[in-house]
Image: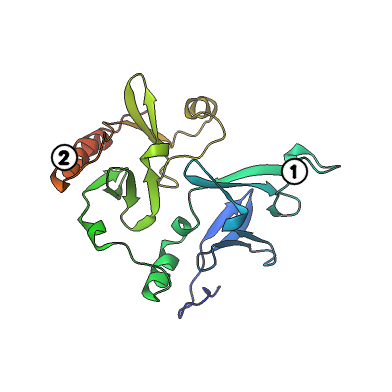
Amino acid sequence: MEKHNNAQSIRLLPVFQVCGIDYEVHVDTLELVDRGNALNRIREEDMEVVGGHLEFWFDKQMRKPYHGVVLPEGRATSDFEKVRLHSIEALDPEGMLLLVKQGKYPPQPEWFSDLPKVEIDGTEFYVDQASFYQVDNPWNEIKLLYGLHVEQGKHVLYYDPNIKNVPLLAVPIQEYIQESQMQTIKRFEFPAFTGEIASKTVLKEHAMVIQKEFTRKVGI
């Protein structure tokens, strides 16, 4: 059993797999720590922000991020893999709540809980004009700017229930679905937000329309 850094109670830290290797999630330092060697740490600053998410190249032999621009001599391309994640904070909502209680991280704004909600595949999300925020893990944010696709004049959101967010893929979503045997990714069509939504009434109306589409569960 591991002790959460700077926490008063002892708890198991969540684990995030990087190329099959278990890394503990340390939200207090925004790091992923190799369970087999605590000296191997992947820091948030080792990652690049791309399209609203984080990604980095991982050296599977050294078990560390790789920052080079060319392949090292004597190494194969298969030794390296691109890793993608939405955020470190979203991987450990319990740890984030501890930091908020300790005054080490700002709480959500008071108006946050006044936002309307929608349910996506059994998980509730707050809705505003730009994002969906998971109710019991508000650090897990579906950013519509990057998550929405336009297909044949329709706005489409692909959703992965395993991470409760849009999938982060190296290939176009349709290509992935055709090649993959996994049928977990779900497809939803709904009206996109256009312009500024100034009133809660209008925002709630949008949420009601969106909820109908999520309830209908348009499958792939």
Q: Residue at x 68, y 63 (%)?
A: 36
Residue 52 position in % (x across, y down):
47, 44
Tell me where residue 75 sits by quadrant.
Answer: top right
Would you name the residue on which mark 2 appears?
205
Relative to residue 51, is residue 191 depicted above or below?
above
Q: Nearer the viewer, residue 161 or 126?
A: 126
Relative to residue 101, is residue 25 depicted above or below?
above
Tell me where residue 153 sits by quadrant.
Answer: top left
Q: Is residue 81 left or right of residue 169?
A: right
Task: Give the farthest residue toward the right.
Answer: 74
Q: Nearer the viewer, residue 179 or 203?
A: 203
Specify whether residue 126 is in view.
yes
Q: Secondary structure at mark 1?
A: helix
Q: Nearer the viewer, residue 202 or 151?
A: 202
Q: Nearer the viewer, mark 1 or mark 2?
A: 2
Task: Give the farthest residue toward the top.
Answer: 152
Quarter containing the C terminus: top left
Tell me the tag on residue 167: none
Q: Of callouts 1 and 2, which one flags the residue occurring earlier in the amino acid sequence?
A: 1
Q: Secondary structure at mark 2?
A: helix
Q: Is residue 184 left or right of residue 79?
A: left
Could you classify mark 1 by the number of other residues whose Cα lies within 10 Å: few (under 14), some (14-19), or many (20 or more)?
Answer: few
Relative to residue 130, is residue 181 depicted above or below?
above
Q: Residue at x 24, y 63 (%)?
A: 110
Specify whether residue 220 is in view.
no
* Distance from Cα at disc 1 to Cα at disc 2: 50 Å
Could you classify mark 2 by the number of other residues whose Cα lies within 10 Å: few (under 14), some (14-19), or many (20 or more)?
Answer: few
